[in-house]
Amino acid sequence: MTEITEDIPQGQLAYRRLLDEIRRGLLPPGTRLREVELAERLGLSRTPVREAMRLLEGDGLVSHLPRLGATVRSLDYAEIMELYEMRAVLEGTAARLAARAASEVELAELQALNAEFAEASAEEARAAELNRQFHMILQDAAKNRFLIKSIGALQKTMAILGPTTLMEPDRVQAAATEHARVLEAMAARDGLRAETEMRAHIEAAQRMRLRALRARQPKLEEE
């Protein structure tokens, strides 16, 4: 699908593209961000690239290091654990509120999305997009704007972690089963159970993330 960019300010366009590259792991933690090189690669002038880097710094995704300049931030173990702890709290709360507030139409849409997600295990990009839609619709069903804003801010920081854990073997099927347990509780209008199941889902993703980071550690040390 082609992104429509005509009405997007160049600074926002550069920001979105760099954020997407961070999220996809194309700009991993520690990567130096050189204005001239980025402007050339993105086909933009340096001014919008500079604006994009300021926005990324405001999101906590970019920091300035002595002698290196602007770089993609690296998260330490404690920060990763804190992020997932907050994600479990926020998304668990969203599931509890959605169990009370979701319409039958929203519940049906979530069921359909999860069924489609379960069939997409061989297509990483499609599975990731369906998973994103599932969580977004569930959060919207909670009908709490302040909660959605908090989750959005957290998700930006989590972009530093790189590609989704859904690329791990059998993770899509396991995640679909976890989603189904959340939906079962929501359909029963059992908010506490929906929250418990969502927290368990996030904790499972956390375990997969830590396993992936441990697998990468020797390679990082060799570099």
Image (spheres, grey):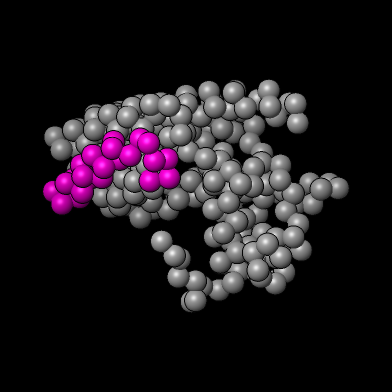
**Furthest residue toward bottom:** 7
* Left or right side of 160 for 136: left
Asked whether residue 110 is drawn in magenta, I would say yes
Asked whether residue 4 is drawn in magenta, I would say no
Q: How many marks?
A: 0
Task: From this view, report whether residue 68 is shown above or below residue 193.
Answer: below
- Which residue is more in the foreground, 88 or 7? 7
The quadrant where residue 51 appears: bottom right
Where residue 79 appears, x then y in whole percent? 59, 33
What secondary structure prevails in the magenta region?
Answer: helix
The quadrant where residue 170 appears: top left
Instruction: Residue at 56% x, 66% y: name it.
Output: 13
Where residue 124 appears, x then y in whole percent? 42, 40
* Left or right side of 162 for 130: left
Task: From this view, report whether residue 197 is shown above or below residue 26.
Answer: above
Residue 171 visible in the displayed image: yes
Locate the N terminus and report the quarter of the image it occupies: bottom left
The quadrant where residue 75 appears: top right
Where residue 131 appears, x then y in whole percent? 36, 43
Task: From this view, report whether residue 33 is shown above or below residue 218.
Answer: below
Q: Which residues are magenta?
A: 101-126
Locate the C terminus and report the quarter of the image it occupies: top right
Instruction: Residue at 71% x, 42% y: name it.
Output: 30
Residue 147 visible in the displayed image: no
Where residue 209 appears, x then y in whole percent? 51, 29
